[in-house]
Image (spheres, rainbow, N blue to C red):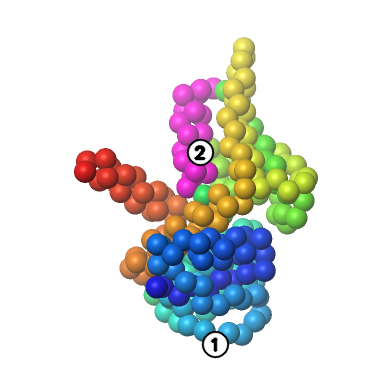
Amino acid sequence: MKKVIINGANGKMGQAIARLIRQNTALELEVSALREAGQSISQRADIVIDFSSPQGAQEALSLAQEQKAACLIGTTNLPERFLFQMQEEHRIALFYAPNVSLSVYFFGELLKKAAQMYHGYDLALHEIHHVHKKDAPSGTAKKLAESLGLPERCISYERFGEVPGTHILTLLGKYDKISLKHEALSRDLFAASAVQIAAWLVKQPAGFYTMQDYASFVLKSSKKDSKL
């Protein structure tokens, strides 16, 4: 079993990830320690998973480097300097994504195709999240907008209730309007994907990985399975 330190363990994502790891023993992951920012721990790990804060994410990476463990960071609103630092990582296997859901990644690919097909249409992105979310617009919305060539002023947002995450792209033409929507029904969408990525990442060589790398692995695996 590969040992896991969960950083930001008291948060809702941290709690969901811990629960799903314990429920899915087939992934051969085991929770070694639950950690919060600033906390010292003695436990060892094969991978550190972080959903905490910008400060906590930097601590998680330092901890992983010290232990020569893999590191998965899903925290958003990170400083630009730290983002560049992660991209230069070559000592450990490091994965970063502002949204770790494979479903959301494929939704982003779908939006890029739609924008190409409806060339000349005006685009606008709207996102909805729970009232506890600290960054606005969301990291996911910023990433989607960037991939579409949309400036941040084209992103609108709402904060209410306990909405896990909804993203809507509107394409407006002269005579019609198209809306494409992704709606997360539970935080487990993100937690389950994070656990799957962690099980994959812990087997990878040192280097920096993104959702594109993991999606490529999943698609290749699906093609192999379909040939069996």
Look at 44% across and 57% down and name the residue there: 196
What's the amino acid at mark 2? Phe
Look at 46% across and 61% down and name the residue there: 24
Element at badge 2?
A: helix
Quarter of the picture holding the C terminus? top left
Q: Which residue is mark 1?
A: 42
- Across and down, in percent, residue 81 comes to 57, 66
Q: Nearer the viewer, residue 192 or 70?
A: 192
Task: Tell me: residue 45, above or below residue 73.
Answer: below
Task: Tell me: residue 172, above or below residue 91.
Answer: above
The secondary structure making up most of the magenta span is helix
Look at 34% across and 51% down and name the residue there: 217
Quarter of the picture holding the N terminus? bottom left
Q: Which residue is mark 2?
A: 107
Q: Nearer the viewer, residue 64 or 19?
A: 19
Q: Earlier in the sequence, mark 2 or mark 1?
A: 1
